[in-house]
Image (cartoon, helix red, strand yellow):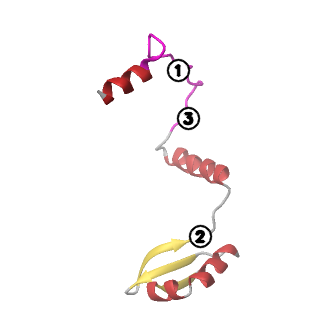
Amino acid sequence: MTTYSLYEAKARFSEVIRLVRQGRTVTVTYRGEPVARIRPVKDGSSELEERLQRFEDAGVLHSPDEPAAPLERVARRPGALDRFLAEREE
């Protein structure tokens, strides 16, 4: 892992981004204390699945036993949103 002070990271931002594009993680420090990590972006879907799996493994999140029921319509009459917005403008 590469480390830059905040001043260096600002001065060498292009270099920092080049390192991240190569797959490396860069730590930014402020007065010697780490304050940020810049890392490559993974494919969003696989990263989300990995995070959800970690939450399940930790017991924080549980998968539903059965799929969710379809959502039911709340508005009884069509055009409820238009009426609501018209009332707001008055």
Query: From what the image shows, is residue 13 above or below residue 75?
Result: below
Dominant secondary structure (helix, strand or loop) of the stretch shown in magenta: loop
Q: Front-most of 17 and 75?
A: 75
Mark 2 Cα-neighbour bin, 10 Å: few <14, some 14–19, many ≥20: some
Tell me the quarter of the image containing the C terminus: top left
| x, y percent for residue 16 | 59, 81
Marker disc for residue 71: 1
Please state which of the two labelled residues, at mark 2 or mark 1, is closer to the viewer: 1
Residue 23 visible in image: no
Is residue 77 rendered to the left or right of residue 20?
left
Q: CA distance from mark 1 to mark 3?
A: 19 Å
Question: What's drawn in magenta, residue-wise?
Answer: 62-80
Q: How many marks overall?
A: 3
Amino acid type, label 3: Ser
Who comes first in sequence, dot 2 or dot 3?
2
Residue 1 horizontal/vertical position (percent): 59, 80
Q: CA distance from mark 2 to mark 3?
A: 29 Å
- Amino acid under label 1? Leu
Question: How far across and down, in percent of the image, does residue 65 sit?
Answer: 57, 27
| Label 1 packing within 10 angstroms: few (<14), some (14-19), many (20+) | few
Which residue is denoted by mark 2 in the rendering?
A: 39
Q: Answer with the quarter of the image where residue 85 lies.
A: top left
- Residue at (45%, 88%) from the top-left corner? 7
- Dot 3: within a 10 Å radius of its alpha carbon, few (fewer than 14), some, or many (20 or more) residues? few
Q: Amino acid at mark 2?
A: Arg
The disc at residue 29 is none
Q: Is residue 77 magenta?
A: yes
Mark 3 lies on residue = 63
Q: CA distance from mark 2 to mark 1?
A: 38 Å
Tell me the element at label 1. Answer: loop
Residue found at the far right of this picture? 22
